[in-house]
Amino acid sequence: MWPAAGGPWPASSSIVGSVTAALLVAAVVVRLFAPRLWSSSWIKQRRGTASSAAGARLPSGSLGWPLLGETPAFILAAYSPRPESFVEKRSVLYGKVFKSHLWGSPAVVSADPEVSRAVLQADASAFVPWYPRSLMELMGESSILVLGGGLQRRVHGLAGAFFKSPHLKARLTADMRRRVARAMDAWRRRLGSSSSSNPVRVQDEAKSQCHVLQIVFEILVRALIGLDEGQEMQYLRQQFREFIAGLISLPVKLPGTQLYRSLKAKKRMTKLIQKIIQDKRNRRVTEGEDARGTHPSDMIDVLLGNGSDEFTDELISDNMIDFMIPAEDSVPVLITLAVKYLSECPLALQQVEEENMELKRRKSDVGKTLEWTDYMSLTFTQHVITETLRMGNIINGIMRKAVRDVEVRGHLIPKGWRVLVYFRGVHLDAAVHDDPHAFNPWRWKERADVVGGGGGGGFTPFGGGQRLCPGLDLARLEASIFLHHLVTNFRWVVAEEDAVVNFPTVRLRRRMPIEVTPRE
Ligand code: HEM
């Protein structure tokens, strides 16, 4: 859910262009006039001659320009229709694990499933997460994304168990079903009252402006902090939008900069969330056991119920804000990409329609509404979501920093270096997935066990190891509910061709406009 393989670059391509040009000039000056800046160990690493006592060798590759390294080449590829070309070109020259220099630091890049898997499985004694400075600044020190060791494991374990719990899934499904139905009724009314064609833009609908994005966000916020629809929710949403605008911005926090505005917005959100935490703590004291109920109703209850002193108000509120990021972005993008790929593959769309219509008929014949287990039992729809995750690469990869010299399957990753585990390179590698650029949900027929990846290094849209995404079931469930209601209520045609933009985050250039017609 995090723009991990992005960097401290602002979203606008023109700003990226000028920053890159300025840094290029700086690099040339440094190269001409300060050759002695590079230490002998740096030169050794540059030449790829460093090796560990056990014989692991630094992968070969190029560190590119001093200061700039290979970041401009990475960014140029990231803006192109084939972002993986950066890795593909170097894999041909050096192999699927190679050295480079990205985001201001020497780095080892892995597009090798087994090496990637080993890095994901490693614990904080070997690697810690690494994020661009603006992101670190905004997330705060007690964020689960930055925490290491026992505290991260505890927050992760509690969150994973809560988001997997059948009780939460049942409540969330009922919420989402009700609200998606309401949004789709609004589409019908809009279509009925408009004579001209008025395309629905899935990325807006799946995101917030007025419909489904708002639904995805509000449903998750309710699960996290127990806030219902209303004015406070609106306020939180507004602040949150300001907050995430700074996640990929220049790391300068002077008044007037985006980072400054985002930090202010975070403060306002923190105040609201800490008030909710305080109210909950007070209720626990005054009402004792009665305040707890049989099931925790939100994530704050889960953390408070754990009774650990480490879960301070600050830690809880920081983490609640971090958990909101995927709701705002990753899940709506997953939904939008699924609609795009289905629009381009009529056979798959037809099979999804048949499967979902059949379920709808079966349930309505006996007068029942759909449970979360019904949505998740739609085998082909699940294959479509799996294939969308593979092709779409909503998270291109993740970055770690080596806290000591680490050896991974014969490769040396020196202390202080970054590792880019490049999921996209593996997901689109013909040696791992046949005909990787073709949308082929049927490929998962024989691999029905694959849900989130995490087990093998060949499919890791949700990461793996100790940091495997705790929201993966939820992401799939929300996408399934949306697709079910879309295909059983409407038919659609693409209103305007659209293209996927991959940098700094994955999205659709035109927000995926489709023209919908209600089914009889
Ligand atoms: C399509 C949707 C999603 C995708 C592709 C996705 C992907 C990922 C990935 C790749 C990671 C691993 C990061 C790392 O190793 O450093 C991750 C971690 C995480 N995800 Fe998601 N995610 C999605 C949805 C969600 C949702 C809905 C939630 C919230 C309920 C969520 C909460 C988290 C959290 C809290 C972490 C950090 C875990 C830790 O560091 O211990 N994600 N996600």
Image (cartoon, rainbow, N blue to C red):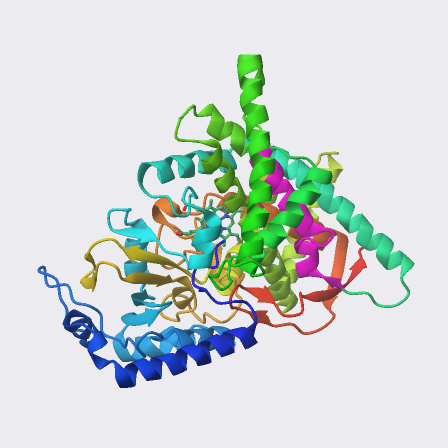
Closer to the camera in the image, 257 or 57: 257
Residue 232: name its quadrant.
Answer: top right
Instruction: Where is residue 390? Give x, y as percent.
Output: 48, 61
Q: Is residue 194 left or right of residue 4?
A: right
Q: Is residue 289 visible?
A: no
Q: Is residue 360 magenta?
A: no
Q: Quadrant of the C terminus?
A: bottom right
Q: Main secondary structure of the magenta part?
A: helix
Q: Residue at x 31, y 61 (%)?
A: 419
Nearer to the camera, 507 or 103: 103
Question: Above or below — where is 186 with respect to 284?
Answer: below
The residues colored magenta run: 200-225
436 above or below 26? Answer: above
Residue 283: quadrant of the picture: top right
- Residue 40 % position (x, y): 15, 73
Instruction: Point out residue 245 in the picture as x, y percentages from the top left corner.
Output: 58, 58
